[in-house]
Amino acid sequence: MTKSSPNDPHGGSELAPVETPAKSDGDPENLTEFETNSEIAAIQLERAKTDGKRQIEWPIIRSQQELKENAELQHRGENIYPMQGKKIGAILIHYGVIDEQTLRVVRSIQKKPLYRNQPMGDILVRIGIIKQDELPRSLLIQAGIPMVDILSIDIPSEVTKIIPLAHIRDKRAVPIGIYNNALYLAVTDPFMFTDNSFFMMLTGMKVIPVFAPMHEIVRRINLHDSGKKSTEEVKAEFLNLAKNDVADPAVQPVADETSNSDVSESDSIIVNLVNQMIIHAIQEGTSDIHIELFNDGAEASIRLRRDGRMEHFASFPRVYHKAVVSRIKIMAGLDISDKRRPQDGKISFNVPHGGRVDLRVATIPATQGVEFVTIRILASGDPLPLDTLGMANRDVSVFREVFQLPYGLILVCGPTGSGKTTTLHSVLKELNSEDRKIWTAEDPVEIVQPRLCQVQVNNKIGVTFATVLRAFLRADPDVIMIGEMRDQETAKIALEASMTGHLVLSTLHTNSASETVARLLGLGIDPYNLSDALLAVLAQRLARKLCTACVKREEASDSDIEYLANEYYQSGHAKPPTIAERNDIIKGWRENFGVDGKIYLGRPVGCKLCNGGYKGRIGLYELLQATPSLRHLIRQQSAASEYQASGVAEGMRTLKQDGIEKVIRGITDMMQVYGACM
C-alpha cells in the first residue's frame, strides 16, 4: 500500500525501507538536513510522551450484521467510512494517530530536499511517528475497503464451503459472507489482489476483497476450515482410535505388565495415534506434549501445555504405552532398547498443508520400567519484531540504545519457556546486516535467520557452549549470541569476549535482573571486569493475555485501583507507599491509560476462539541498565537488593510493575501477573 501491502504477520505493512541520502561535506543542503533532523527529533520526543495515551479504535467489522450493513452501503454507492476519500493526514488526525501540530511539522518536512516528493504516509512511518500497521489501515479507509476481524466474525458454513479448501489455502483468501450476490473475501492485500477473476469464475459471483492480517487468515483457516475438526471431535476420534484394537477386556494387562503387550511400534494403530496427537498439538498452538503413565493408572494420559497452562487432551489404553514411546523414539533417532537412561533427540515432522515443524523429544525412565515422554514444539519461523514483544516504550528505547553499542555484555534472564530466545533473535534481527558478522551457539537452533552463522551445541561429542565460544573468537565475529551461560567457564569466556571488541548476548536462569548480577559474581566473575563489560540485564516472564474477542471490560473501583497502586509501589521499593505517593501513581494511570479519566480492567469470559478467556501470551519485562551508579555497586559486590534499588531510582520497572501496567491497560489480569512473577 503506497500502495503498500498490509501483509505483515502482525497485521502491519511491510513498507520498504527508505534509503537516506548520504551527507557530503561542504554541501549547502547539510544545514537543511540538520534542521530537518532537529524537527524530527522534537516530534519523536513528543510522540514518546503521548504514546501510552492513544486509544485508537479502527472501524473493524466483527459480526455478520456489521458486514451486512457495510454491504448495503456499498451496494447503494455510499461511503462506508466517515473519512472515506479524505487525505491520509486528515484520517490519521480523525482516529487520534497524530495531532494537527505533527501534521503541520511533517508538511514542512515534506518540502525539504531530503524528503521532497515522498508521500506523507511513508515519511510518518520512516521517522517513527506512526506504526507500520497504522498507515495501511488509513489507506484502506481512504479507499473505502472494509477491515474485518476474521477471528471474531461468525462465518456461516455454507459460505465457507462455496470455495474448495485447496483454493482457500493456496490463495490465502477466506470467504466471509455473501450479500447482494457479491462474495466478500478476506485477503491480506486488497490493493494488489489479482485473483478476482479466478474467484468470479469459480463462484459465479462478484468478488469484493476485504482486509484481514495474514496471521489471522492463517489462524482462521487452521481453526475453521471444513477439513479441521473441533477439539472435542478430535478427542472423541482419538479415543475411538485408541480403543479400536482392544475389543476384548481380557487383553488389558495388569498394572505392572506394560511390557507384555503384542502391540508393536510399527502397527498402524500406533503410528496413527502418534501422528494425530502431534498434528493436533501443533494446530492448537501448544508448546509441549506430555505422555504419562502412572503406576496406579489403567490408561496412559496425554497432556498439552498451551499458553503456559497444562490441560488434559486424551487417554489411551495402558497396553499401548510402550509402543507409543518406542514409536516416538524411532522418530527422534533414539535407542529403543535403552529404557534405563534419559535420552533426548529431535524430530522434523511434516504437517499436512503446513510445512515442517521441529520437535525436541526427551524421555525419562521412572519406576517399574515406565518411561515418560515430553515433546517440545519448537517455535520455528521468522523472528518477531522487537516492537511486537510487549515492552514498554522506555524499555524498548533503552534496550535499542544498548544493543547498538559495538561491544559489551547483554543478558536476558528468566525461567525455561519465558521467551528468552525469542527476545534475543528479535535483537539479532535488528543487528543482522551486511556489515556485521554474527555467530550463535544454541541448544537447540529454533529460529533460523539469513546471514547468521548458527551452531548447534552437542554435549555428547564435546561441542559445548564453552568450546564453541572459543572457536567463535577465532572466526572474526562482531556479534556473538550464546544460548545459555551454564557454567563458570562459559561465563568467563563470554566476559572476555565482550571486553575485546565483541557484542555478546546470552541468557541466564535467574529470577530477576538484579539477581543476575549477584549470580555472575557468585560464579567467580571478577567484579571489576563485570562492571566494565555489562551493558544491561533484561529479566522477562510470559503471562496469558485476555482474549480480545470475549473479554469483559469493567470500570475499576477506587479500592481496586488503590490496591494495584500499593502493589505497584511495594514491588519497586519494598515498602508501602504514602498516600501522596499512591495518589501520584493513580493520577498517572488515569492520564496515560484511562478513558475520560476512568480505568477499565479486563475480566476473562471464554469463547470458541480462546482457552477459558485467555488467548496468547504477553511478555513482562524488567530492564536493568548498567549505569555508573550500578557499576560502582558491582565493584563493591553489593547485595541484589541494592542493584534493584539503584535500577528503580533510575527508571527501571520491576516485572510485577510492568505486569500491573498491562493489567491497567486491559491486556491481562492480576491472577496471571501473580502466576508469572511470584
Image (cartoon, rainbow, N blue to C red):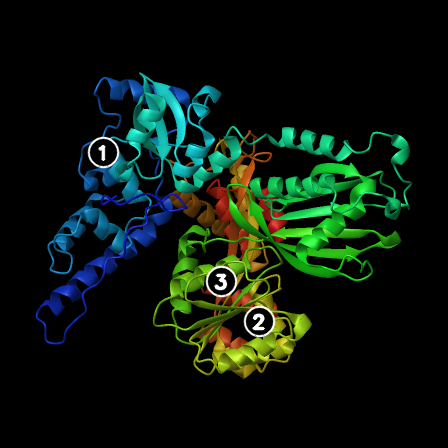
Residue with the mark numbered 1:
143
Residue 651, percent from left and from top: 45, 61
Q: Residue at x 83, y 45 (%)?
A: 294
Image quadrant where residue 100 sits = top left
Mark nearer the N terminus (3 vs 1): 1
Q: Residue at x 76, y 31 (%)?
A: 244
Q: CA distance from mark 1 to mark 2?
A: 54 Å
- Mark 3 and mark 1 residues within 8 Å of each other at the beta carbon: no
Residue 296, percent from left and from top: 88, 42
Q: CA distance from mark 3 to mark 1?
A: 39 Å
Image quadrant where residue 476 sits = bottom left
Residue with the mark numbered 2:
517
Mark nearer the N terminus (2 vs 3): 3
Mark nearer the N terminus (1 vs 2): 1
Local packing at callout 2 (Cα closer than 10 Å; few below 14, some 14-19, many 20+) is many
**Depth order, front residue of 558/52:** 52
Q: CA distance from mark 2 to mark 3?
A: 19 Å
Local packing at callout 3 (Cα closer than 10 Å; few below 14, some 14-19, many 20+) is many
Per the image, label 2 sits on a secondary structure element best described as helix
**Depth order, front residue of 472/129:** 472
Q: Residue at x 68, y 71 (%)?
A: 460
Residue 440, percent from left and from top: 50, 69
Q: Residue at x 34, y 28 (%)?
A: 199
Residue with the mark numbered 3:
424
Q: Is residue 249 left or right of residue 445?
A: right
Label 2 amino acid?
A: Val
